[in-house]
Amino acid sequence: MNKIFYSKGQPERKLQVFSCLFCLVFLATAIPPVVAEVSDATSIISTQTDPNQLVFEAQALYQQGKFKAAIPIWKQAAQGFAQLQDSLNQAVVLSNLSLTYQQLGDWESAQNAIANSLALLNSETEKDAIILAQTLDIQGKLQQETGKLKEAVKTWQKSAKIHHESDNLLALEQNNLNQAQALRDLGLYSRACQHLLNTVSLEGISTCQQLNRLTKTELKTKLKPLAANASITTVSTLRNLGDLLLIIGQPQQSEQILISNLNLAKKLHSQEELGVTYLSLGNTYQALAEQEEIQSQRRRYQQQALDAYNKAASLSPGKTIQVQG
């Protein structure tokens, strides 16, 4: 594993700190496969004094889903950077600590950690704005998880401005998706749709109403260019768009977008996204069946829904998806 954190005075410090924080923002939604075996957390704490090394160990534990074991190591790394008077690295570690607490549902500890991180970053110069933006993204996630949806949207708007100014397009895409999910939960469907469409960039389409006016052929043509530069963020955004279209009563468009999304998820070999997309597609087929008056067509939709739910359950390792399916 390459070095991630650098102490002050080393030229690569800023870039590498950002890389770790940026990585963990996405780890919040999907824990990747185990990448390294680490020793027991207690022995690590007693033998490791270099905060950079502690960061490696904490990140490895996080990636393995061993959140409780990662917490004391994040704390010791933060203390180590504080002793070195490296406030930027200390702030990043505290943000990662907050993210780890969020995984455990310890919202009070997560809030304390992110508040301490932001206090350190507020004293930094403008050159560290990118780190501030990523920390705000984590704060927004915490606010969303604790039901403070309006506050989450405001926080993500602040970080989106920084991402835009720094031309960080990938982070801006994730930010748009986060805002769309919160706006949807607030019932602000039109604004949510705009954020999703801004992320996937369907030519000439900026509202869900415009999508509703497209024929199947026209929509298929609009979706086709997405395959060229598909990413997990693209796939997640399209799935959320399909879910939103179903909520606002556009199941035909939802079906077509979700089917397109299945192809992208297969291309990216993302089993997790395949599973949740099949679940969304099953919901869409069920809605189509309920509004279908022709009995034979209704039965066909019902069978398609059942098939999709079965595939979702078989593909998704998460118990929640299996139960829903």
Image (cartoon, rainbow, N blue to C red):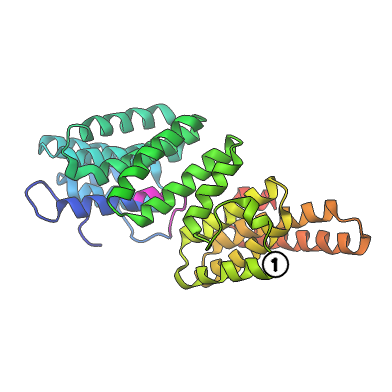
All told, the count of numbered labels is 1
Asked whether, in this view, residue 303 is left or right of residue 68, the answer is right
* Residue at position x 22%, y 32% in the image: 122
Residue 121 lies, with reference to residue 207, above or below; the image says above
Give neighbour class at mark 1: few <14, some 14-19, many 20+ (Cα, 10 Å).
some
Q: Position of residue 88 (x, y in %)?
A: 18, 41
Residue 152 visible to the viewer: yes
Residue 28 counted in the magenta span = yes
What amino acid type is highlighted by mark number 1? Lys
Using the rendered view, name the quadrant where residue 134 is placed. Answer: top left
Q: Position of residue 110 (x, y in %)?
A: 38, 32
Using the rendered view, name the quadrant where residue 74 is placed. Answer: top left
Task: Residue under label 1, please give it.
Answer: 216
Nearest the viewer among 154 and 218 is 218
Residue 125 lies, with reference to residue 311, above or below; the image says above
Residue 319 counted in the magenta span = no
* Residue at position x 73%, y 59% in the image: 252
Q: Which residues are magenta?
A: 24-32
Residue 80 visible to the viewer: no
